[in-house]
Image (cartoon, rainbow, N blue to C red):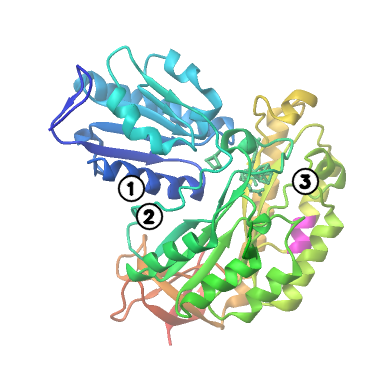
Amino acid sequence: MHIFAQGYILMKKKLYIETYGCQMNVADSEVIFSILGKDGYERTTNMDEADVILANTCSVRDNAEQRIWGRLEVFCKQKEARPNVAVGIVGCMAERLKDKLIETGKVDIVAGPDTYRSLPEMLRNLAPERPQINVLLSKEENYSEIIPVRTDKNGVSAFVTIMRGCNNVCSYCVVPYTRGAERSRDPETILEEVSDVVGKGYKEVTLLGQNVDSYHWKNADKDVDFPDLLEMVAMLNPSLRVRFATNHPKDISDKLIEAMARHRNICHHIHLPVQSGSNRLLEKMRRRYTREWYMERVRKIREVMPDCGLTTDVIAGFCSETEEDHQQTLSIFREAGFDYAYMFQYSERPGTLAARNYPDDVPPEIKTRRLNEIIELQGQLSLESNRRDVGKTFEVLVEGPSKRNQDELCGRTGSDKMCVFPGLGHSAGDFVNVQITSCTSATLIGKIV
Ligand code: SAH
Ligand code: SF4
Ligand code: F3S
């Protein structure tokens, strides 16, 4: 039995976390399970039995935050039924809204992304009428030596954070404010974590950072950039699949592209967010590349790795976007022929450069119409891309039964396309060669050969 300050007596300390936002948050929730695990908490996936309910949140767009407000009502119902339950908002929304969350009277714990080591203490100090908040951003915190508790379902694919924060200040983006300054993690600790993952039987790691191309670790005896790190990870174990995200078009180097081509176990997939096809808007977004630069990088990638999957992010309806700008976005999509895209409407985030300097002046119905046009075009491009793969054979890492049809398996190609196929005695974690026989715009369909 563990006794918190009066009023919070927990028989069994069960911790439930809901994770929203990007893969970095998934990795952070695993760090939180590890930190609180050492303090006696047990992970649960059943909110009804949780003593502590945390939401690891995202602020990147307003609808991400609205979703959390909705969840908070659900958590409050748990508190009504079981008054000793503690409810916490952690992550980017905690960092952005700070004590405004406490002022709602619905939240006991508010913890920013760099404060997770203080969660045990915050929970100990918690008492009725004494909510706990810590939103300090750090220049150093990397949770370096903490081995995360893996929470994925199938034990096949793990995330490893290699850096935190972002120094880029794209004008629309809240991430630099919620995650703070960029810092890279000691490559030794990254390699240790990857070894741990391999030891636990994982077959794939994804190295994570907001802009992995600016990874840089330098001390008296080491000077390691991202291509160096990637090769070190790839060479640790040639049968481990290695992925990474996200790259920034202004920074992605020939050295990286060539390193990817050199190692069989580095997946040929690059997520290269374009955001817009209009040079005028790219400038206004402070992306610091042009459309021509972006397309030159795409050509370089395809020249070195013709089989490389290329995916992107795009924002429709950024401040002052004209029909002409929008047409430029559609045309760069056609020119680049993306395999897949994450497509968003611009959502003004308070405090960002864009919110301070440019009116959010594209009417919502026009944003929606332009977004729908991009979605429709990308649907065709994905279908064309998948059709080009029919007849080819790919190495696929089995993730488990297909969601649609439990008799079939699913898994991804190196280029990051989802494949479904009859299983024939295989299971999660196996590498199989799959010949593609047909496709939809979302999935390759094939058979093991
Ligand atoms: N670090 C990554 C992206 C992080 S956020 C990068 O630089 O590419 C993920 C995506 O959310 C962004 O690529 C962008 O497309 C989108 N996004 C960020 N801020 C947004 C906003 N204010 N409105 C709409 N989409 C946004
Ligand atoms: Fe945001 Fe730009 Fe940093 Fe990506 S690179 S996280 S879009 S500021
Ligand atoms: Fe969202 Fe924070 Fe990730 S704002 S996208 S959870 S870094």
**Residue 286 placement, left or right of 368:** right
Q: Quadrant of residue 130?
A: top left
* Label 2 element class: loop
Residue 438, given in percent of the width and then of the height, sits at: 52, 75
Residue 267 visible within the image: no
As measured in the structure, the alpha-carbon distance from the residue carrying label 1 to the one carrying label 2 is 7 Å
119 vs 436, nearest the viewer? 119
* Label 3 element class: loop
- Residue range in magenta is 332-336
First reached walking from the N terminus: tag 1 or tag 2 = 1
32 vs 375, nearest the viewer? 32
Residue 196 visible within the image: yes
* Label 1 element class: helix
Q: Is residue 280 above or below residue 238?
A: above
Name the chief secondary structure element in magenta.
helix
Mark 2: which amino acid? Ile
Local crowd size for mark 1, using a 10 Å CA cut-off: few (<14), some (14–19), many (≥20): many
Of the four image quadrants, the one with ligand 3 is top right
Mark 1: which amino acid? Ser
Confirm or reject: label 3 Cβ below 8 Å from ligand 2: yes
First reached walking from the N terminus: tag 3 or tag 2 = 2
Check the picture and name the quadrant holding the C terminus: bottom left
Q: Give the residue number, with chain letter if any, for mark 1.
A: 34
User: At x 37% / y 39%, what residue is drawn?
Assistant: 18
377 vs 54, nearest the viewer? 54
User: At x 43% / y 33%, what residue is drawn?
Assistant: 90
Residue 179, given in percent of the width and then of the height, sits at: 57, 38
User: At x 77% / y 26%, what residue is drawn?
Assistant: 361
Local crowd size for mark 3, using a 10 Å CA cut-off: few (<14), some (14–19), many (≥20): many
